[in-house]
Image (cartoon, helix red, strand yellow):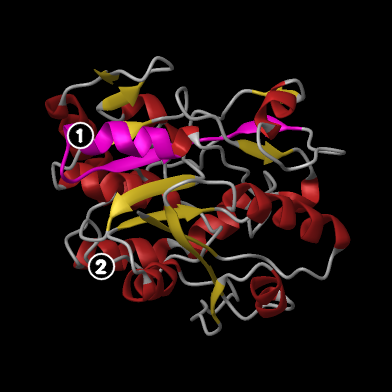
Amino acid sequence: MITLFACPKPFTEPRIAEVQRKAIQSWLLLKKVSEIILIGDDELVAEVAAEYNLKHIPYLEKTAHGSPMVSDLFYKAKNAAISDILMYVNSDILLTNKVIDAVDIVKQAFNKYLIIISPYLTDINGLTIQEGYENRAFEHIVNQPIPTGADVFIFPKTIYDEIPPFGLGRCFWDFWLISDPLLKGIPVIDATDFAPTFHPVDESSTHYVEYTQREAPVLAEKSISARSQAFNMQMNINFTLTDSAHLLRRHDVPYKLSSEGQIIQQKSMWRIRMKQKIGLWMDKTAPIRRRIGLYRWWK
């Protein structure tokens, strides 16, 4: 069985409330999900949890900038979960039972693992969430899944020991969640092709913090302290704030679950570790490269 957890935004803005309700309705259709936990004390989260008979954990630590703390979010979910397998989902992501099928396949191959999924951008206006809703959702896909990061993370309770103090929605927290298991030699499987999920196309329903090209360097700068703590905990990150070439992309993970349900090795671990070392070198030499004009923000 699986414990699904999420950290919703306030349900006060009508469009955000509609999207998050549809996401919850899709989660309730999942087989083998023993419980759904909503974590956080934003407005109406407790009321919505009660409405759908979901577990609610009210208090969540936040960063100095007001974002929910990823470390506290995962810690509370881990301690409260009745299942040994956890699934974190961004609160506006619609899921299908293919996600559960992906877990069943991967569990047969590996004892420890991380499954990641990136969603299709989809127009969900007028979409009714019921059994088989995904057939209609496929007709309204606007764009393919993005190549970086993920919106769904599925893993056994034991794979994350300690998480740096990233803010949910701030830069790079999801990349770290992918990178850390890789450093430990834990298989990371991209199940995007096998298990379609859907992200509503709407400016108001994106992640907790909206980025613009102008804001991105500022948000990244605010993440430096979390990155530093990650190094101090010897949980090095395989990307750098200085160059987008070192951001972990989905095709960089060692395994992929094909649309036919086959686990395919797409990259060897030695190549991943080499990328890791290059990224760490870029991070450590960033101050020097900045002084000589070789430092730049991503484009």
Q: Where is residue 191 in the image (x, y as percent from the top left)?
A: 40, 30
Camera-side mark, 1 or 2 = 1
The N terminus - image quarter? bottom left
The C terminus - image quarter? top right
Q: In this view, does 134 lie above or below 150?
A: above
* Residue 47 painted magenta: no
Residue 285 seen anywhere in this rendered image of the structure: no
Q: Mark 2 points at which residue?
A: 162
Q: In this view, does 283 lie to the left or right of 45?
A: left
* Residue 120 painted magenta: yes
Answer few, some or many: residues within 10 Å of disc 2's Cα (few below 14, many 20 plus, some between 14 and 19): some
Residue sitting at the far bottom: 59
Of pointers 1 and 2, the one earlier in the residue sequence: 1
Q: Where is residue 174 in the image (x, y as percent from the top left)?
A: 43, 50
| Magenta highlight range | 100-122
Residue sitting at the far top: 260
> Could you tell me which residue is drawn at 30 percent across and 48 percent down?
283
> Could you tell me which residue is drawn at 45 percent across and 24 percent down?
194
Amino acid on which disc 1 is placed = Gln
Q: Name the residue under label 1.
A: 108
Tell me the SS state at disc 2. Answer: loop
